[in-house]
Image (cartoon, rainbow, N blue to C red):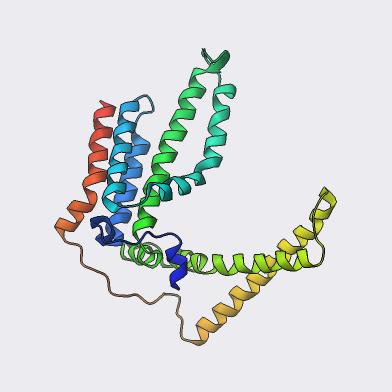
Amino acid sequence: MSGPHAHTLTVHGHSPVHELPARVKLVAMLLFVLAVVATPREEMWAFGVHALLALAVITVAEIPFGHVIKRVGVEVPFVVFALFLPFLGGGPTTELLGMQLSQEGLWGAWNILAKATLGVTASIILVSTTEVTAILRGLSELKAPASMVAIAGFMVRYLEVIGSELRRMKIAMAARGYSPTWIGQTRALATAGGALFIRSYERGERVHQAMLARGFTGVMPRTESSAAGVGTWGLGLSVPLSAWMITGVSLL
């Protein structure tokens, strides 16, 4: 897997978070997200502590806050959905800014926003401190299905290839005078999308045949991984275990 695919996601550094093995960070992220999900929505203070834990990791890892904020935008669809809940929810209502809003809808919106934001932030920390190849290797070491790991690896590798193909097609269409101004002209765009799908499928077939010709047996070759002792696991799991302690208190 070539370097540029990882550089667009990873913030290179030498912090303690960067030095942790990928499998430790994967387990830590999963445990942290599960702790956030298990936290009752009414316990706002607990979500505040979870956010402080994530902020502490970001600071230790020396990840620029602008980098994190820019990528948190991936949760926009969840935000849009959550904004409608106070208006669509049933049950008792409360007045806010002159509007009657559902109390259950407000709690639901808060629950989605808080948990989605913390979950996305945890994933951003992972990909910002770990190369994509290391994440895939970590999944293999954690005994994830080999087919799933292989598919994920190819997806990351060829997303940029397909994106480049799409950009070339758009340039070719623009050079031929394509400038959509009404809905009838979207037919050309749909045709281009179909052509891109066929090209991607055919490219995948050619790549697979080439791999088989080179002795591919369905399992990607593995590289040596760094050791993870008790101290390493203890350091890596300190944050998610703290999050679970907070969640436990909030459940009492």
Is 60 drawn above or below residue 131 in the view shown?
Answer: above
Q: Quadrant of residue 221?
A: bottom left
Residue at x 30%, y 60% (from the top left corner): 23
Q: Residue at x 39, y 57 (%)?
A: 127
Q: How many marks?
A: 0
Q: Position of residue 45 (x, y in %)?
A: 31, 27
Residues 210 and 119: in front is: 119
Which residue is most to the left? 231
| Residue in view at x 49 percent, y 18 percent | 103
* Left/right of residue 153 with respect to residue 36 in the rendered view: right
**Where does the C terminus fall, quadrant-wise?**
top left
Where residue 2 appears, x then y in whole percent?
45, 73
Give residue 12's quadrant in the image. bottom left
Between residue 69 and residue 92, name the one nearer to us: 69
Q: Give percent across and percent down for residue 42.
A: 37, 24
> In the visual, does 142 lie left or right of 180?
left
Screen quadrant of the N terminus: bottom left
| Residue at horizontal 31 percent and vertical 65 percent from the top | 141
Left or right of residue 236: residue 147: right
Compared with residue 65, is residue 232 higher up or lower down, i.e. above or below? below
Q: Position of residue 59 (x, y in %)?
A: 29, 47
